[in-house]
Amino acid sequence: MSLDAITLSVIQAALQQTCDEMDLAFSRAAFSPVIAEANDRSDGIYSAVDGSLIAQGSEGLPVFVGVMQHSTRTIIEMIADGRVLPPEEGDVYIVNDPYLGGTHLMDVRFAMPVWRGGKIFCWLSNTGHWPDIGGSVPGGFSASATAVEQEGLRLPPVKLFKKGAMDPEIYAIICSNIRVADQRIGDIRAQAAALNVGQERLFQILDRYGDETVVAAIAELRRRAAEQMRAHIAALPEGNWQARAYVDSDGVVNEPLTIALTVEKQGDTLVFDFSGSSKPCAGPMNSVLATTLSAVYLAMRHIFPNVPISAGAFEPLVVRRPEGTFLDAKYPRPVSGCAAEVSQRIAEAVFAAMVQAAPDRVTAAPAGSSGNFALGGNDPARGRDYVMYQISGGGYGGNAGHDGLSNGCSTIGISKSPPVEIMEQAYPVLYRRYALREGSGGAGKQRGGFGLAYEIELLRGEARASFVMDHGRFGPQGALGGRDGMVNTVTVFRDGQAHVPPHLSKEQDIPLRAGDRVLVGTPGGGGYGDPFERDPQLVLRDVSLGYYTRRQAAELFGVAIAEAGVDLAETERLRRE
């Protein structure tokens, strides 16, 4: 079938808009702040044949791009071989098993077939981060789990909705295994409603243009996405590039984990080899294959953002399966840190390799941590239990054109920190501080962006705090002579005594009482280029805005800032020290 350019563009925009409306409906209807305010969710359209990605919402988490594609394909395969009951109209499957194309257990996926003329036309799928899924600690982010069973309830693909009605037995099993179960119905209904919105919009597109035309458009869009990505790759210089990134520890053994990457250009294809990475680890910083693949895909999307989101964009990206490493986790390896933390270290390794090949397109490393902080307890004033989940931003890396963004969202998505006012209203906490973390951006010709510094006090009752963060041992990497960003810091003040987790960025079940405080400093982005080449006027501006002290500016950038009270001799002396 021949498609004119205008029709193709309109259908492409309509599919994208369908996913955007699903995202919007999900967030607006959700109960939990992590979805309703932080937008830790994503929606997409997937092939009925192999689950490959057709379209995803522009406001959805990029890390879920490859993950939901893998998960939908797995459901289709399990239906075909009889391991999962076949679908009927109105059915919605629920699944969060990481080993079946997922991330961690808290990311719960719904998948619904869209029927047309008695056949499945496509699948709609979405993922939402539930604030609790059971397990040993409130919020599910166990920092020292040694088996996936300790992390929460694991669900294979089962029908939560059958012919449009929720199965009360499946729902009862879920509620019997999670905390604050009475609050989950709002998120479940919102997640299902988003799929229904998508189906209605999709029917409108099909009714307007016809099924055959839309099918042809989807195939053409996939072909063109692959063609665009291949063109970008073909323009890169010949060669192969190596890089390394490090995870602080696995939360159990206090030693860093290594991500060793080699990227090789083979014509218009890139081959990613992680075979030199650390072996599977004891703690929860293993990554399942779907998350590892998705991390590579999203990193390349950062580098070539104009390539449409489609399975075609991934075809020229060949990731050799990293068997025998912690980037290919198999049951029962714990995985609670894989999506939020390990995936970002994988992306950092891709950036560090690709900046050698395309310095004008690739940034220095961003903060690269979601800053997972979970607080669970009982609020005596309201007479109910709660699970609070805080994510936080950090600095972006500098690049060839400008400084890095300050307090940006994580590499893996568009999720933002929930508003302080919402968190204080929903939970018994007070934010004593919420500000840019001055001095945290890595020095460079274009400096890194600044992280976030916040301090939370527990106002009432007792609670347990857990942290699964990263970059506490190594700061985000600078590029082409730029310096690393400042590391992540966590300090817990209990009865006035400061406690720093032995693993720096990971610990669980820290008991808190009213008046105890948690202080977190998120990483700044890496610097890009030689700091001594930075425009002195820009350094002066940063000092005047309080981003760096005069001493820091002199040490990091090696320039005279006479207007700020530092003369040439003093500048040189400080730099030599």
Image (spheres, rainbow, N blue to C red):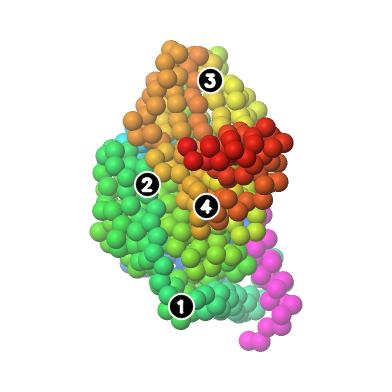
Residue 457's mark?
A: 3
Magenta-drawn segment: 1-21
Give the overall secondary structure of the magenta segment.
helix
Kind of residue at disc 2 = Val
Residue identifier under label 4: 482
Left or right placement of residue 122 versus residue 144 in this view: right
Q: Is residue 456 above or below residue 115?
A: above
Rounded to the nearest angstrom, the CA distance separating label 2 from label 1 is 30 Å
Q: Earlier in the sequence, mark 4 or mark 3?
A: 3
Is 6 included in the stretch rendered in magenta?
A: yes
For the N terminus, the quadrant is bottom right
Residue identifier under label 2: 247
Q: Nearer the viewer, residue 189 or 62?
A: 62
Marks 1/3 in contact by CB < 8 Å: the verdict is no
Of badges 2 and 1, the one in the foreground is 1
Secondary structure found at label 2: strand
Rounded to the nearest angstrom, the CA distance separating label 4 from label 2 is 20 Å
Single out the residue that lies furthest toward the bottom: 2
Mark 2: few, some, or many residues within 10 Å (few <14, many ≥20)? many
Horizontal and vertical percent position of residue 331: 27, 51
Kind of residue at disc 1 = Glu
Of badges 4 and 2, the one in the foreground is 4
Horizontal and vertical percent position of residue 353: 44, 63
Of badges 1 and 3, the one in the foreground is 1
Secondary structure found at label 4: loop
Is 396 included in the stretch rendered in magenta?
A: no
Q: Residue at x 71, y 80 (%)?
A: 5
Rounded to the nearest angstrom, the CA distance separating label 4 from label 3 is 36 Å
Marks 4/2 in contact by CB < 8 Å: the verdict is no
Q: Earlier in the sequence, mark 1 or mark 4?
A: 1
Mark 1: few, some, or many residues within 10 Å (few <14, many ≥20)? few
